[in-house]
Image (spheres, rainbow, N blue to C red):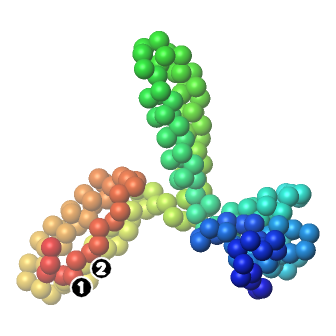
Amino acid sequence: MERVTNPADSRRCQAPDATGQCWGVKLEGLDYCVIHAGAHRPPEEGLRQYLLSKAHDRARLAMLAEHDDLKSLRDEIGLTRMMIEELWNSAQSAAERLNVFGRVRLHIADLEKLVKTCNQIEERLGTLLAKPTLLRVGQQICKVLVDRLSGLPNYEQLVDILEADVISIIQEARNDAATVPALSPPGES
C-alpha cells in the first residue's frame, strides 16, 4: 500500500487509526485508502446488506463487521446500564425521579431484551454453558479423578471431598464480569 510522507498531503487517507490519522494514500474519488475503504477485498467478499453511499460509512461498516466482539451484546448491555444510571442519577429530588421513571423503565425493558438476546447468541455460539451442562462437566471431572486416583490409600474419601468441592463451585457459580484467577501449579496456593 502506498503511503504519504507529508502529514498535510491532500492524498492522505481521512480514516482514523491507532496513531491518529492513516498515512495511506486515498483511492481516486474516495477519502479513504484501500484498507479503510474496504476495497482490498474481492467484490464477492465486499458485498454487504446495506448499500451505503458514503465511503466513510462503508469503511466503518467493514471495520465493525470484521470485529469478533460484535457477536456479543455485552458492550451494548454496559452502555444501556450506564444510561440508566446516568438518567436515574440526574434526578435530584423525588419529583424528578418520578419524572424520569418512565424513561428508566423503558431502558430497563431494553436492557432485559439485550441480556436475553445476548444469552441466546452466546448459547448458540457455545460460549455460554447452562448449569446442567456444567454439572455434567463436573461429574466427568470427578470420574477422571476416580480413574487417576484409584489405587491410592483412601482415594474414595479424597474423591468424595473433591467431588463435593467441584459441585459446590458449580452450584455457586454466577456469570460475573470478574476475571478467572490464574491456576497455581500443584502444591502452591
Residue 79 visible? The answer is yes
Q: Residue 95: image x %, image y %?
A: 47, 12
Query: Is disc 2 in contact with disc 1, using a CB cutoff of under 8 Å?
Result: yes
Q: Position of residue 108 (x, y in %)?
A: 53, 33
Could you say which quadrant of the image residue 189 lies in? bottom left
Q: Residue at x 75, y 81 (%)?
A: 4
Q: Judging from the image, what secondary structure is the residue with disc 2 in?
A: helix
Query: Seen from this angle, which residue lies furthest top?
Result: 95
Residue 41 in the image, given as x and y percentages of width and height: 81, 78
Q: How many marks?
A: 2
Q: Quadrant of residue 22?
A: bottom right
Q: Residue furthest right?
A: 29
The residue depicted at 58 percent of the width and 58 percent of the height is 72
Please indicate whether residue 147 sits to the left or right of residue 161 in the image.
Answer: right
Q: Amino acid at mark 1?
A: Arg
Q: Which image quarter is the N terminus in?
A: bottom right
Residue 146: in sight, yes or no?
A: no
In terms of secondary structure, where does tag 1 sit?
helix
- When the figure is inspected, residue 113 is found, relative to residue 23, above or below; the finding is above
Looking at the picture, tell me which residue is in the foreground, 5 or 115.
Answer: 5
What residue occupies the far left of the structure in this picture? 153
Amino acid on which disc 2 is placed: Val
Task: Identify the residue shown where x is 35% and y is 57%.
Answer: 178
Identify the residue under disc 2.
Answer: 144
Residue wearing tag 1 = 148
How far apart are the alpha carbons under marks 2 and 1?
6 Å
Count residues near mark 2 (Cα–Cα under 10 Å), then give few for <14, some for 14-19, many for 20+.
few
